[in-house]
Image: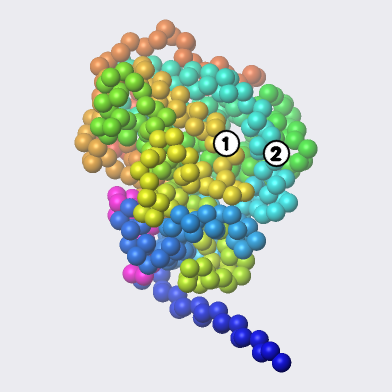
């Protein structure tokens, strides 16, 4: 009788270091924001997956290897997107008011569901976005860009983050989603609070109530906009699903978008490879976008997954229900990739991969490209007002965003009044028109405060 060789035992789960232990690299605070690449290098010394803290007491594993990231993103039978599996949140180890919870909590939308439910909710999104005409979208971006450039052009100086990159996606969002302009301030407060972890629980509530108001409005008065198309989809989204789908779309269409625009402008204005082409009259915007998506993706660490059972990957034990965060930035810069050719190379993970990859890659890239091209066309002699190394980055585990992007340029004449103004949403209030360009010198303010000041016209 042939004996069956014994199955090798699964390695025991190693003891988990306590929060704050050096074994957990911190992904929050100014030190990480200033040099995340150094943290990723230290984590790679541990392996393709290593322990981190996303916020005080919030433990997770960060995937820093490219191959490991693809494995997690594509292995839906092993790694779930459903945060209701998050054991530390369920048992109270992570308090519900932790600043990262609104970015990781369960919501009934396509980002946090699996299987058939994910396909139903994602199908509504992809079908609604497919109805957006690229030429119409380009027109919205160009008109919004002209409006903002008209406001900064006469001054000869500006913060291209607070006065341009942060505001433009919101103007475009309002148009595409049929959002009345008087909702703008509440949406800005809610979304900025979630991403920056400032009163995140209150910000999450404000965002939800504002979007519920929008859903209620569109149920009563549907229009030719993404919100109404989502409502009319055969997927039959409930009001709750509508609110959380809009949270997903607004989050994906504002924070990452503004970072992609600002980070691309920073690169174009500071890197000799691009600055020389700009001076020669050629605008290598698409190449700059590729470079940023590889090296400084607007969402650096996200794509949170949860192992459905204890699993071993590359010798690392991944515990069931323990957050597994994919570092899109670290995976893209994995030394094992051995490629310096980034222009035209779309193998990066900035848009994630697998069934949860970004469904709006083409519109997002179009918005960023048009925004950058329009700014450089209207203000061709724009320069950074400070050395590039003096630019500061916003703290936070998920995004890769600047605090400010101060520039100078020869004062320019604005286009004739109203030429660049985006048309108001039919039946709603016109886009708010601030009367004063906010001061960019002196003591810097937080990005949300600057943006709200712009929105209020202060």
Seen from the viewer's position, the closer of residues 346 and 136 is 346
Asked whether, in this view, residue 121 is left or right of residue 373, the answer is right
User: Would you say 170 lies left or right of 283 here?
Assistant: right
- Secondary structure of residue under mark 1: loop
Marks 1 and 2, the one that precedes in the sequence: 2
Q: Is residue 120 above or below residue 312?
A: above
Name which residue lies at 48% across and 47% down.
349
- Residue lying at the far top of the rendered structure: 416
Quarter of the C terminus within the rendering: top left
Residue 271 point in image, percent of width and height: 27, 34
- The stretch of residues the image draws in magenta is 22-36
Q: At which x and y percent is residue 75? A: 60, 58
Q: Which residue is mark 2?
A: 124
The correct choice, above or below, for 220 with respect to 293 in the image is above
What residue is rendered at 33% in x and 58% in y?
41
Dot 2 lies on which element?
helix
62, 219: nearer the viewer: 62
455 or 143, nearer to the observer = 143
**334 falls in the magenta region:** no
Q: In this picture, is 16 found above or below 329?
A: below
Residue 318 appears at what percent x and percent y? Answer: 52, 69
Identity of the residue furthest to the front in this view = 1
Q: Residue 229 in the image: state x and y as whole percent.
A: 70, 31
The residue shown at (42%, 7%) is 416
Q: Is residue 71 visible?
A: yes
Disc 1 vs disc 2: Cβ atoms closer than 8 Å? no
Q: CA distance from mark 1 to mark 2?
A: 13 Å
Q: Which residue is mark 1?
A: 360
The local crowd at label 2, few if under 14, some if 14 to 19, many if 20 or more residues have their Cα within 10 Å, is many
Q: Quadrant of the N terminus?
A: bottom right
């Amino acid at each position: 009788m042939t004996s069956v060789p014994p199955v090798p035992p699964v390695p025991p789960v190693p003891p988990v270091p306590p929060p704050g232990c050096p074994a957990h690299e911190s992904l929050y605070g100014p030190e990480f924001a200033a040099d995340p690449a150094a943290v990723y290098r230290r984590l790679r010394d541990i392996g393709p997956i290593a322990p981190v803290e996303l916020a005080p007491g919030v433990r997770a594993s960060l995937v820093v290897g490219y191959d490991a990231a693809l494995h997690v993103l594509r292995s839906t039978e092993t790694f779930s997107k459903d945060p209701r599996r998050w054991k530390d949140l369920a048992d109270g180890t992570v308090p519900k008011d932790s600043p990262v919870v609104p970015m990781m909590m369960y919501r009934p939308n396509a980002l946090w569901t699996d299987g058939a439910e994910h396909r139903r909710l994602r199908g509504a999104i992809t079908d609604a976005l497919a109805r957006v005409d690229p030429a119409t979208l380009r027109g919205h971006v160009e008109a919004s860009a002209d409006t903002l450039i008209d406001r900064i052009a006469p001054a000869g100086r500006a913060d291209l983050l607070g006065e341009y990159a942060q505001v433009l996606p919101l103007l475009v969002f309002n148009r595409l989603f049929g959002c009345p302009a008087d909702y703008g301030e509440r949406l800005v407060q809610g979304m900025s609070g979630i991403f920056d972890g400032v009163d995140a629980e209150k910000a999450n509530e404000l965002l939800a109530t504002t979007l519920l108001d929008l859903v209620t409005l569109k149920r009563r008065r549907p229009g030719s906009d993404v919100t109404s198309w989502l409502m009319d989809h055969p997927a039959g989204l409930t009001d709750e699903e509508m609110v959380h789908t809009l949270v997903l779309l607004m989050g994906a269409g504002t924070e990452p978008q503004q970072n992609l625009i600002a980070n691309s402008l920073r690169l174009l204005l500071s890197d000799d490879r691009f600055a020389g082409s700009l001076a020669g009259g050629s605008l290598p915007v698409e190449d700059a976008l590729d470079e940023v998506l590889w090296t400084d993706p607007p969402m650096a660490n996200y794509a949170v997954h949860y192992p459905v059972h204890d699993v071993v990957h590359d010798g690392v034990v991944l515990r069931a229900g323990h957050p597994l965060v994919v570092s899109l930035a670290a995976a893209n810069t994995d030394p094992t990739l051995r490629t310096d050719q980034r222009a035209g190379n779309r193998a990066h993970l900035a848009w994630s991969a697998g069934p949860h990859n970004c469904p709006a890659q083409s519109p997002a890239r179009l918005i960023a490209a048009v925004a950058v091209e329009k700014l450089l066309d209207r203000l061709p002699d724009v320069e950074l007002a400070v050395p590039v190394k003096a630019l500061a980055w916003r703290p936070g585990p998920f995004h890769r965003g600047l605090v400010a992007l101060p520039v100078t340029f020869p004062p320019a004449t604005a286009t004739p009044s109203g030429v660049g103004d985006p048309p108001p949403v039919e039946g709603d209030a016109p886009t708010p028109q601030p009367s004063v360009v906010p001061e960019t010198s002196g003591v810097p303010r937080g990005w949300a405060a600057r943006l709200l000041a712009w929105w209020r016209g202060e």
